Image (tube, rainbow, N blue to C red):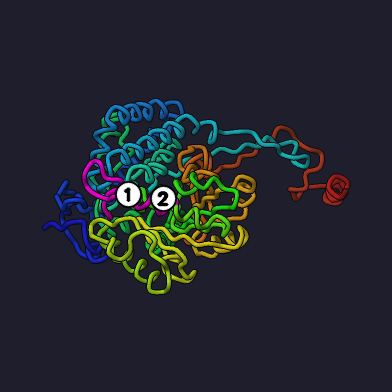
Amino acid sequence: MTQTARGNVEEIASARFETFQSIDPRTGEVVGEHPIHDAEAVENEVAAAREAQSAWDELGFSGRGQHLDRWRKLLVKRLDELAGVVCAETGKPLEDAKLELVLVIDHLAWATSNAEKVLKRRKVSPGVLMSNQTATVEYIPYGVVGVIGPWNYPAFTPMGSIAYALAAGNAVVFKPSELTPGVGEWLVKTFAEAVPEHPVFRLVTGFGQTGAALCQAGVNKVAFTGSTATGKRVMASCAENLIPVLVECGGKDALIVDSDADLAAAADAAVWGAMSNAGQTCIGVERVYVHDAVADRFLKMVSDRAAKLRPGGEPGADFGPITMASQVNIIRDHIDDAIKRGGRAVVGGRDSVRPPFVEPVVIADVPEDSAAITEETFGPTLVVQRVRDVDEAVAHANATKYGLGATVFSRARGVELARRLRSGMVAVNSVIAFAGVPALPFGGVGDSGFGRIHGADGLREFARPQSVTRTKFKIPLNPMSFARPKGTVGTVVKLIKVMRGR
């Protein structure tokens, strides 16, 4: 029995199938058929990963690095092939798929080359009171990490966990989105081709039940990317066994335009941030707060740029379809609500929704409590709001349950405004730039989740710190002994008062 991956994901996930199909959302064409792994199959994959992990860990950073470098070179060599798989399952333009894979390769290289520096054993100062001790800390791999990936960036986003977890010495069991299982399969197969002697990167495919089974299959940590609602269910499942989780959910990212901003650059950034990948970007721009002094000029620039963009399935299209069919209704509802409540449709409107495509939509002057402001739309839409000053802009930007990314355009106050924003990442005078810097941690706050991928924080996310002390010599006053002389603690108290009481 087979079932397509389109339609209502919740209904599909509640059913039980032997196989399922992945579909090109541009055409409805079947591009692959994949197994639905049940709980037993998932447990078997986790067990196999655990068996392989010890030898992988014993290779050390240098040994693992050599294997990961071979995989990276293979990814570079076959980049066009993987880009084709990404296009077939998401519908995004080929150039966008290639740009995503450029970031995949760069992050894999960074994780490989920096893992030892970040995670190796290092000495720390024992302090004066414990000066007879040598103190060290190192980061030990968890063991087996379960990674549950999204469909909008089916290679780049999960590889922010996969690459860093592997570099840290873990095995990984990857459950890709049911909409993009072929991308996950391709990644796992090429790893096996490059590193056949260490089967530490394994695949399970299916729907929600498969992901739930992964959380219960004895993994040592779970890294999840997806909706806030699903993230909470993942956390609840992992909590039963105290399995630590990393959760990266959605966003409702704001862009602030100050009165001294480079308006042309800000408008270009707003349109790219909102419309690229058909707006299906968790760190994409969904709200703009622009200083009243420049609002009219900025809105004109944005409108002129957005009006020229066209979605489609052909190679020359600016962006592709809405990959998950059920999202179309949410996009339409947000547009309808914004306009009914007084918003001005400057570009497009309700008729712009033509499944599976949505044309660019720009709406101005929307009530701050409308769904288009408060909920993640995940489509090629943009709300532009004028404000009295940037203080009001910051207040509105922060008035959200989400807190993933943000953007500021200001010549004089960019960094100052960035620090005031309640978000995990901010780009000043650019858009989404932080995602392309491998050394920067990536993650959010509030309903956008917690934990970090990328950078040193991302490496440490997949290893547990272990602190070790070793006695170098005996000290005359040892307060941690029942055989201590009378007055020992009093002497230590006097010492700490002299040292720390000033």
Q: Nearer the viewer, residue 37 or 431?
A: 431
Residue placed under numbered mark 2 in the picture: 271
Task: Please give left or right for residue 6 compared with residue 243 in the image.
Answer: left
| Quadrant housing residue 349 | bottom left
Q: Amino acid at mark 1?
A: Leu
Farthest bottom residue in view: 341
- Amino acid at pointer 2: Val
Mark 2 and mark 1: Cα distance apart in space: 10 Å
The residue at which mark 1 appears reads as: 309
**Does residue 486 appear in the picture of this structure?**
no
Label 2's element?
A: helix
> Residue 313 vs residue 478: left or right?
left
Q: Where's the N terminus, which quadrant?
A: bottom left
Q: Pinpoint residue 210: horizontal percent, then vertical percent.
A: 28, 56
Q: Is residue 341 above or below residue 245?
A: below
* Residue 141, position as x, y percentages in the image: 46, 41
Which residues fall within the magenta stretch? 301-322
Q: Are marks 2 and 1 in contact (CB under 8 Å)?
A: yes
Q: What residue appears at the point 30 percent right and 56 percent down from the top-left corner?
A: 359
Asked if residue 271 is positioned above or below residue 374 in the image, the reply reads above
> Which residue is at a point 37% across and 67% down the rendered structure image?
334
Residue at (49, 38) in percent of width and height: 437
| Residue 119 picture location, percent across and down | 53, 36
Q: Residue at x 44, y 70 (%)?
A: 370
- Within 10 Å of disc 2 (Cα), the crowding (few <14, some 14-19, many 20+) is many
In which image quadrant can residue 209 be found? bottom left
Magenta span includes 321: yes
- The answer to which of 478 and 437 lies nearer the viewer is 437
**Which mark sits nearer the N-terminus, 2 or 1?**
2
- Disc 1 is placed on an element classified as loop
Q: Can residue 228 be seen at all in this image of the molecule?
A: yes
Secondary structure mostly seen in magenta is loop
